[in-house]
Image (cartoon, grey):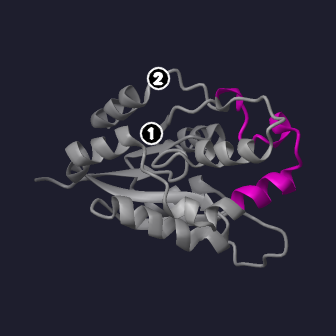
Amino acid sequence: MGMRKTIVWDVDDVLNDLMGEWFRGWRHDHPECTVAYEDLKNNPPHGILGISMDSYLQSLDNFRLSPHYGNLAPVREVKDWFLQHGDSFRHIALTAVPLRAASSSGQWVLRNFGTWIRTFHFVPSKRKGEMIPNYENDKTEALKVLGPVHFFIDDHPDHVVAAQKAGIPALFFPRPWNHSGMSISVTLSRMMTC
């Protein structure tokens, strides 16, 4: 077999359904909220939910640090894709996550996808009071360091567009906030052409 091409995967909301699971818990605690998951047209969704960015980040970080995060199921279609095609590529996980939650994210990736994903890289999401070295400003800078990258898949529009502008083939993973226009299965099948 020739050299395998490299696919870089975002973790949250691509390999798992972090926002959906967090939101279900948040709505349970806020029964007055009438917003549905499909209405989350912005990420972060704090404005849609009528809460401050700090409140949203604190709630999301608490979820990431709880046992709920470790128990997240992989997205079924993605796991099936790895089972069928995973060994045809090299895989890297690239996530933007707060430093204090990076070990939870890494454990989740290796426990659920470690058969295929051997490299875990994160760009620390900034949080108040943290003073940490800055190696890359964003995922696009990280992709350049991790290269060569043949394909990048992420749910966040800013990350996908920035990668595309840098000449890296990138696809939106379908979520309400990115208007990808494709199903998960069609999105995954597109990667077979990378």
Is tag 1's residue or tag 2's residue first in the polypeptide sequence? 1
SS assignment at label 1: loop
SS assignment at label 2: loop
Drawn side of residue 110 relative to residue 139, left or right: left
Q: Residues within 10 Å of mark 2 (few under 14, many from 20)?
A: few
- Where the C terminus falls, by quadrant? top left
Q: Which residue is mark 2?
A: 182
Magenta stretch prevailing secondary structure? helix
Residue at 63%, 62% in the rendered image: 64
Residue at 29%, 42% in the rendered image: 80
Q: Position of residue 67 (x, y in %)?
A: 56, 66
**Tag 2: amino acid:** Met
Q: Position of residue 28 (x, y in %)?
A: 72, 44
**Tag 1: amino acid:** Pro
Up-down relation of residue 84 to residue 42 (above or below):
below
> Is residue 53 a member of the stretch shown in magenta?
yes
Up-down relation of residue 80 to residue 112 (above or below):
above
Q: Which residues are magenta?
A: 38-61
Q: Position of residue 184 (x, y in %)?
A: 42, 31
Q: What label does residue 169 carry, if any?
A: 1
> Is residue 123 a member of the stretch shown in magenta?
no
Q: Quadrant of residue 137?
A: bottom right
Q: Residues within 10 Å of mark 1 (few under 14, many from 20)?
A: some
Residue at 14%, 53% in the rendered image: 2
Q: Position of residue 126 (x, y in %)?
A: 75, 65
Q: Nearer the viewer, residue 170 or 125?
A: 125
Q: Nearer the viewer, residue 174 or 171?
A: 174
Give the number of the mark in front: 1 or 2: 2
Q: Is residue 100 visible?
A: yes
Drawn side of residue 28 relative to residue 18, left or right: right
